[in-house]
Image (cartoon, rainbow, N blue to C red):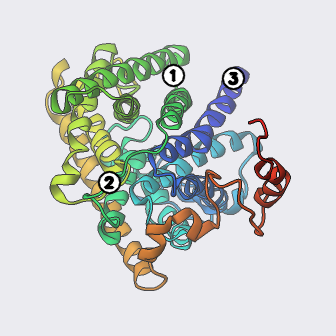
């Protein structure tokens, strides 16, 4: 088991890397230059807030119940308060699940780029984690007989299609509805400011996702190496298929296959295979990836049809991709997989498909209703959105007093930082006529 614990330490570090810096880079590059720091900050502070909150009560809410009775929606938040009575060897698994909670909250931020108050985000993240994520994680990951989604309903979710991706996608949709459209959207073009950062972030997400999926292996009587191999291969091949599926639809619809499409296809494939990674064979993984890539590529364009300003396509990728991957378990799962259930195409009938659909509906309803309550409470007290003038000027400057790119080094600044020092040191060069460049 020493090797297994060593692997779990690495897997945990990989999943944490998926948020900082991978998701921050992915979203930051997709943002406008005047919003990139705020976008990245939302990921970093989500890690800080959710991590501490998870150790305080999150682990207890998700995992303190025993296998026979752990609560339908969540376990007692005070049974293992601040990891009371939790053995130090279990800390590895606490930290692993903590990284899931962190990235789920951070994923939401992409939908609200450019316009959500930073103070509102700082309040939303802990409230949403306590009320929405921790209970849904219990319903999916706790493995107790009474937990709703994977216990009572019997849906399969290997690594978080419902608790992570559908949950984050629904929350993103709700926040977008409460916040409204960005100033000038969709009239003004709001292109990504640095696709190099986005491509780098997508690659790091793919790398980190092996910790996400392979680290979620179910330890039991099965051959651990066999399950790790299946999960690793499925994650890889589904992602490859999704890139191709996205680019094909993009080419057919818009005439171009873009780098942003490739990066988005990576994420769509990873999202879709997350719940199915241990349940399907290689053929099923390729099918799920290709379907998810194509469907998500089509779905992201619907925001213009419905007037929904989902800034960085969280709904189109995570909600849609999560639903595709979770539902298709009922079609492609095999009895050789972790769940031991044959899907529709493998002679298992429609029972598994029904279970998967019910699991999706519960996740959507639970997340949607309670996120709306939280968003409304913040909107009508603290307020959700920055002032229109601040949005036009740039949320980085308005909320953080900074800009990502110093484009005026030749002018003196009396503010904090090195801009003024640099300007003073280079002033003689600018004043000397005929000086060499």
Mark toward the start of the polypeptide (3 vs 2) = 3
- 385, above or below 128, in the image: below
What kind of element bears circle 1?
Answer: loop
- Neighbor class of circle 1 (other Cα within 10 Å; few <14, some 14-19, many 20+) is few
Q: Calculate the distance from the C-alpha at mark 1 to the C-alpha at mark 2.
A: 30 Å
Is residue 154 visible to us here? no
Q: Nearer the viewer, mark 3 or mark 2?
A: 2
Is residue 216 visible to us here? yes
- Neighbor class of circle 2 (other Cα within 10 Å; few <14, some 14-19, many 20+) is many
Horizontal and vertical percent position of residue 106: 51, 52
Q: Which residue is mark 1?
A: 221
- Left/right placement of residue 289 relative to residue 231 reads left
Mark toward the start of the polypeptide (1 vs 2) = 1
Q: Which residue is mark 2?
A: 363
> Which residue shows up at 46% across the image and 57% down it?
133
> Which residue shows up at 43% across the image and 55% down it?
108
What kind of element bears circle 2?
Answer: helix
- 273, above or below 63, in the image: above
Q: Which residue is mark 3?
A: 1
> Which residue shows up at 58% across the image and 58% down it?
58
- Left/right placement of residue 301 relative to residue 176 reads left
Horizontal and vertical percent position of residue 74: 47, 60
Q: Calculate the distance from the C-alpha at mark 1 to the C-alpha at mark 3.
A: 14 Å
> Which residue shows up at 69% across the image and 23% down it?
1
Mark toward the start of the polypeptide (1 vs 3) = 3
Horizontal and vertical percent position of residue 100: 53, 45
């Amino acid at each position: 088991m020493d090797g297994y614990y060593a692997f779990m330490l690495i897997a945990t570090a990989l999943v944490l890397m998926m948020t900082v810096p991978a998701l921050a880079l992915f979203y930051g590059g997709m943002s406008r230059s005047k919003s990139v720091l705020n976008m990245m900050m939302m990921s970093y502070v989500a890690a800080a807030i959710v991590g501490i909150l998870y150790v305080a009560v999150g682990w207890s809410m998700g995992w303190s119940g025993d296998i026979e009775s752990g609560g339908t929606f969540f376990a007692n938040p005070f049974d293992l308060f601040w990891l009371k009575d939790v053995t130090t060897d279990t800390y590895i698994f606490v930290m692993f699940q903590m990284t899931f909670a962190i990235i789920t909250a951070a994923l939401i931020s992409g939908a609200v780029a450019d316009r959500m108050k930073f103070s509102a985000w700082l309040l939303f993240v802990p409230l949403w984690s306590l009320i929405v994520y921790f209970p849904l994680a219990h319903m999916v990951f706790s493995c107790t007989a009474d937990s709703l989604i994977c216990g009572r309903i019997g849906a399969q979710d290997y690594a978080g299609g419902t608790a992570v991706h559908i949950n984050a996608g629904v929350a993103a949709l709700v926040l977008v509805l409460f916040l409204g459209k960005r100033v000038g959207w969709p009239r003004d073009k709001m292109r990504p400011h640095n696709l190099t950062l986005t491509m780098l972030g997508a690659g790091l997400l793919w790398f980190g996702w092996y910790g996400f999926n392979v680290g979620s292996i179910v330890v039991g009587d099965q051959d651990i190496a066999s399950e790790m191999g299946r999960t690793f291969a499925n994650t890889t091949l589904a992602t490859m298929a999704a890139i191709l599926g996205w680019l094909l639809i993009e080419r057919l619809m818009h005439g171009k296959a873009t780098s942003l499409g490739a990066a988005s296809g990576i994420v769509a494939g990873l999202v879709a295979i997350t719940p199915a990674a241990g349940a399907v064979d290689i053929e099923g993984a390729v099918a799920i990836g290709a379907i998810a890539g194509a469907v998500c590529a089509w779905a992201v364009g619907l925001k213009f049809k419905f007037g929904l300003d989902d800034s960085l396509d969280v709904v189109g990728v995570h909600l849609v991709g999560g639903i595709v991957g979770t539902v298709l378990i009922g079609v492609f799962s095999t009895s050789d997989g972790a769940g031991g259930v044959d899907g529709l195409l493998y002679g298992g009938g429609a029972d598994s498909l029904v279970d998967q659909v019910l699991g999706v509906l519960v996740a959507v309803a639970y997340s949607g209703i309670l996120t709306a309550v939280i968003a409304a409470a913040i909107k009508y007290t603290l307020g959700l959105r920055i002032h229109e003038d601040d949005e036009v000027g740039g949320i980085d400057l308005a909320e953080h007093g900074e800009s990502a790119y110093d484009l005026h080094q030749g002018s003196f600044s009396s503010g904090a930082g090195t801009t003024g020092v640099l300007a003073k040191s280079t002033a003689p060069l600018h004043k000397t006529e005929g000086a060499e460049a």
